[in-house]
Image (cartoon, rainbow, N blue to C red):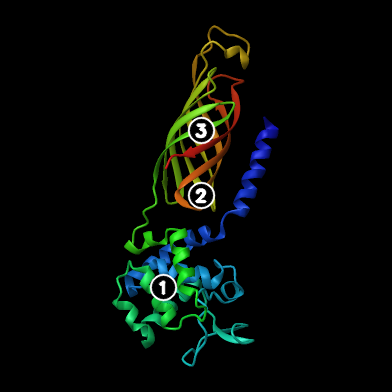
Amino acid sequence: MKNTITFLFLICALIVEAQNKTELYIEQYNHIAVKEMKIYNIPASIKLAQAILESGSGKSRLAIEGNNHFGIKCHGNWNGDTILEDDDRKAECFRKYLKVADSFRDHSLFLNEGGRYSFLFKYDRTDYRKWAKGLSKAGYATNSKYPVLLVDLIEKYDLGRFDTGINNKKNVYFAHSYGLPYLLGVGVYYFQDNSLSFLEINTSFIFSSATVGYSYKLLNEFYSGINGGAFYFPVVRHIYDEYDNNSLDITPQMSVEFVYRYKFKRNINKSILFRVGTQISLLERGHIIPYARLTYLLD
């Protein structure tokens, strides 16, 4: 069992490292895009798609060293810090910002105050296709496929959900689990901001447990937390200690658990939880059960 848990920890670590960088970018900056949309009426989907495309999901040199997520060049009216980067020509001048939010704000001002983009604000805020074509028409980028690239990003990651100012991600899930030593489980899971709460029942068909738990997000989609509930040992208590007629069939327990949530790229509401932990009896000595399970959140 220890080897199994170690192996699953390694798998979780690898998955965290390899998690889609664009999804992480969206999670990190969507609230800024929505805030800017409410002030300047630029669709959050368009702003996020442009930022993802122009900054390589925040991994480009301009983004890392200059906090420039929109590829905005210096132009004649820029008096702030600058960074040089090859683009259409070598060592072109790009704007450099103190923080990422400044880049998002300057992008809003760039579109609002630039006369060539004024016609865009006649479009409906939820019509990201018109906005994408309009940006290209106004000359934001030289790539003729720029509108297609933006629309593809918006539809792949369902960025249109942010254009209402509300993130319509699902929070409550029914789920089923498979693992060891509990073979099957069912439960209800609730995600809110950086936390996960759940109620579940698991069984090995020999012993069972019912638990209520809470976990907090540590990093990306990695959670850690505790849960409490009860073991149910009907006639097989001797598996864990010597048979004792005074031993309880139902005993309270608590657990420490680590969870990784993997989200599917094509459906933001569909995901799997990789979970490992240890259950400890609060009354009877010897009842310690390490466990590992996969929990499928039902869409």
Q: Position of residue 22 (x, y in %)?
A: 53, 61
User: Mark 2 packing: few (<14 Cα in 10 Å), some, or many (20+)?
Assistant: few
Instruction: For mark 1, give the secondary structure.
Output: helix
Q: What mark, if any, has residue 132 been given in the picture? A: 1
Q: Earlier in the sequence, mark 1 or mark 3?
A: 1
Residue type highlighted by circle 3: Ser
Q: Residue 264's mark?
A: 2
Q: Nearer the viewer, mark 2 or mark 1?
A: 1
- Which disc is residue 150 wearing? none
Q: Secondary structure at mark 3?
A: strand
Mark 1 and mark 3 in contact? Answer it, CB < 8 Å.
no
Q: Secondary structure at mark 2?
A: strand
Q: Is residue 133 above or below residue 298?
A: below
- From the viewer's perspective, tell me whether residue 10 is left or right of residue 271: right
Q: Residues within 10 Å of mark 3 (few under 14, many from 20)?
A: many
Q: Nearer the viewer, mark 1 or mark 3?
A: 1
Task: Report crowding for label 1: few under 14, some 14 to 19, many 20 or more residues within 10 A (C-alpha).
Answer: many
- Specify whether 53 is left or right of 38: right
Name the residue rendered at 30%, 74% in the picture.
Answer: 123
Q: Kindly identify the amino acid type of the residue bearing the numbered disc 1.
A: Ala
* Left or right: residue 54 compared with residue 105: right
Q: Which residue is mark 3?
A: 177
Q: Amino acid at mark 2?
A: Phe
Q: Residue furthest top?
A: 245
